[in-house]
Amino acid sequence: MIEQLAFAPRLLIASDFDGTLAEIVEDPDLATPLARSKTALEGLAGLQGTTVAIVSGRRRSQLTERFDDPGFILIGEHGIDHGEPTGPDTPPLTLARELVDAAARATPGAWVEHKARGVGFHYRAVPDPEQVLDDLRRSGGAIPGIQIMESKKILEFTDSPLNKGMALVALKESLGVDRVLFMGDDVTDETAFAALGESDVGVHVGSGPTLAGVIVPTPSALADLLERLLAARAGAFPTSSGLRQGPALT
């Protein structure tokens, strides 16, 4: 199935970051893409008819720190942050920020991540988070105009209706691609898997229920898959410079 993507005239390769291209780590600031995955994506982005996009829950500025290839499309905050100003906070978002800040102050081990159009409650280091999460879901859900997103050890609140699936559909239409490969590991990636067409391929990293048609156990296994795709596509398509790229892998 993956090798078949290699012969698509116009291919979009899109991926989540944490838990997909990078291992999950205790300190998110220390997360970096696996070298093999990054190298494979850079090789793919250099081939004609191939576009690489990173669609992550992180802020876009954090993605630019980790991916320096100018050919990559970087989209943060689950499809919200394309690099343009998003405007001031709405009153519902202001309330959500205050709610999460207060919960974090009262919860040892929790910390808050403020984003352009949302706020995340991180609870990976909280020993027993269920009560505070239930309180946040109830209180946040009562704020009109606020959406709640469940991620791995993060509870996020946003005033935007966008998600990764909508971002992927917009990319596919704007680029006019023939096929899409999307890779992710989290609940928020399921909206992207749901948006894929019959000829597209979704790859879920890890365990758990998913709409993806392909499952790999770890980010390292995903790196293997990307290297296979690069080797197959490099033999079929020249680089963007017009020179044919020989097999990079054996």
Image (spheres, rainbow, N blue to C red):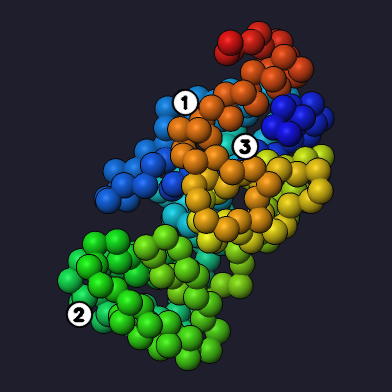
Which disc number belongs to residue 106?
A: 2
Residue at the spot 26% in from the left edge and 81% down from the top edge: 102
Looking at the figure, which quarter contains the C terminus?
top right
Using a 10 Å C-alpha cutoff, classify the residue at mark 1 as few (fewer than 14 neighbours), some (14 to 19) or many (20 or more).
Answer: some
Q: Upstream in the sequence, badge 1 or badge 3?
A: 1
Q: Where does residue 130 sit, x and y in percent of width and height?
A: 33, 77
Q: What residue type is labelled 1?
A: Arg
User: Which of 224 and 65 lies nearest the eye of the viewer?
Assistant: 224
Q: Is residue 140 shown above or below 67? A: below
Q: Which amino acid does label 2 sit on?
A: Ala
The reply to whether residue 17 is in sight is no
Using a 10 Å C-alpha cutoff, classify the residue at mark 2 as few (fewer than 14 neighbours), some (14 to 19) or many (20 or more).
Answer: few
Q: Where does residue 196 sit, x and y in percent of width and height?
A: 73, 52
Query: Disc 3 designates what residue?
Result: 52
53 displayed left or right of 172: left
Spatial separation of the CA atoms under disc 2 and disc 3: 41 Å
Residue at the spot 20% in from the left edge and 80% down from the top edge: 106
Q: Is residue 241 shown above or below 187? A: above
Q: Where does residue 226 sit, x and y in percent of width and height?
A: 58, 29
Q: Which amino acid does label 3 sit on?
A: Val
